[in-house]
Image (cartoon, rainbow, N blue to C red):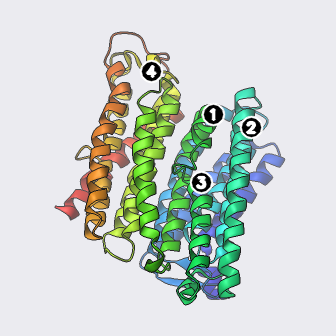
Amino acid sequence: MGRDLALLAPEIAVLLTAVGALIAEMLRRPRISLITAVVGLVVATGLALRLLGTDTTIFGGSFRIDTLSTWAKLILLPATVLSMLLARVDVRGSAREGTVYSLLIFSTLGALVLAGAADTMFLVLGTLLTGLATFALVAYPDTDPATEAAMKFFVFASVTTSIMIFGLSYWFGASGSTLIADLPAMDSMPLAVILGFVAVVVGLGYKASLVPFHFWAPDAYEGAPLSIAAYLSVVPKIGALFALTQVVRDLPPEIGWTAVIAGLAVLSMTYGYLAALVQDNVIRLLAYSSIAQSGYFLLGILAVGSSELALPSIILFAAAYAAMNLGAFAVAATTGRTLNDFDGLGRTRPLMGIAMVMFLLSLVGIPPLAGFVGKFMLFGAAIDAQFTWLAVAAIVNSVLSLAVYLRIIVPIYRSGESASAATDPWHGIVVITAFAATLIIGLAAQLFIV
């Protein structure tokens, strides 16, 4: 037990941080709540660094401490800190400031639980923990759009999570175990494995906003504060996709799960970009963009077990995606929600304009930015796993994505005045950090690829 708790130290630190931030809020000390949250997450990140290279399980094989779960901590904890700095602008001085910080950390804890899940009960726990916290985060502004978005989010999540729990009962009933590692022993009952897998895809697919489980995402992103939309597009999504990766590692290939993942990848990439093409609201455009980007993750997931590039490509793309997507939302938070708000941004605030262009080109996959190396690795993993046709489809969608992101880039250098000329220092810190990460990940990773 002592060994298990020592290996779980980062998650314990995150839990204590969330409780500490909540206690500070109860004492009406929101500034202390923010400091506690940031320091606690930095400490948890430091504890996670010690686990690099560890590959084991704890609590009877129900939770994995491996490359995937460790990198989830190293990506999601800094991403949560940046999201809190963005949220600071939205909630500063409000009666709920510390509560928001605490909910963000509880939700991140759920994402970490998902990323290390080796047991169906941890899949349920992680899904519920991220879900309950994010419902409240979407609804906290107490406005009609936020309430409507939270209600849609809640109803959709309740249905999909119920389906997942129902499907997991097939796995338990057939194997007599809740461990995912026991799935291969169910080869005499393929129907039960298939039904359980489909239910897991429904439950995790909604959280990752994969098509056709994406309906909540554009409305929730539009109704929620931009800082929360940025958080939703990164942390719970990556946690769910890492959880799906952990599940397929133990799935028997005979049930044909790769065909399901490949189909969802094409649907998500293509539908996401086609829907984004007709959006005039930048937040909805970025929401559909995030749906398409989820499809790229699936290229790496379907290569699990067939290519050594699979896990490195998923991790690298997750780090790149977190940096470029948080950066794009941070610029949007200082500029506006419509395409017209970006008119002349490149002239009135040239550095902010350059940063937004870099984030969008990285989302396309233009070298030498982080998005390029992430997609390059994912395409390599798919080809290595004999899914060349899917890699070609992903490249075609990347070309399509250029048309999507040019809809924002063109107004940036068009004549006109951007909606806001002021940038909050917290926004500036997030944009600079995300910009540096987008460049460094791209340049550093290419040294190893070339």
Which residue corresponds to the image point at 50% horizontal and 65% vertical from the top-left?
242
Label placed on residue 348 = none
Q: Earlier in the sequence, mark 2 or mark 4?
A: 2
Q: CA distance from mark 2 to mark 4?
A: 26 Å
| Nearest to viewer (mark 2 / mark 4) | 4
Q: Nearer the viewer, mark 1 or mark 4?
A: 4
Query: Is residue 289 depicted above or below 111 in this figure?
Result: above
In the rendered image, residue 112, in percent from the top left (x then y), is placed at 59, 64
The residue carrying pointer 4 sits among few (fewer than 14), some (14 to 19) or many (20 or more) residues within 10 Å by Cα, namely many
* Residue 278 coordinates in the image, percent (x, y): 44, 27
Q: What residue sits right under mark 4 in the picture? A: 339
Question: In the rendering, which numbered label is found on residue 140?
Answer: 2
Q: Identify the residue under disc 1.
A: 225
Residue indicated by mark 3: 207
Give how far apart the Cα atoms at labels 3 and 2 are: 20 Å
Whole-number angstrom distance, CA of label 3 to CA of label 4: 27 Å
Residue positioned 61% across, 41% down in the render: 228
Q: Secondary structure at mark 1?
A: loop
User: Residue, x 33% and y 16% (percent of image)?
Assistant: 347
Q: Are marks 3 and 2 in contact (CB under 8 Å)?
A: no
Write down the quadrant of residue 6 in the picture: bottom right
Q: Does the residue at mark 1 contact the one at mark 2 (Cβ under 8 Å)?
A: yes
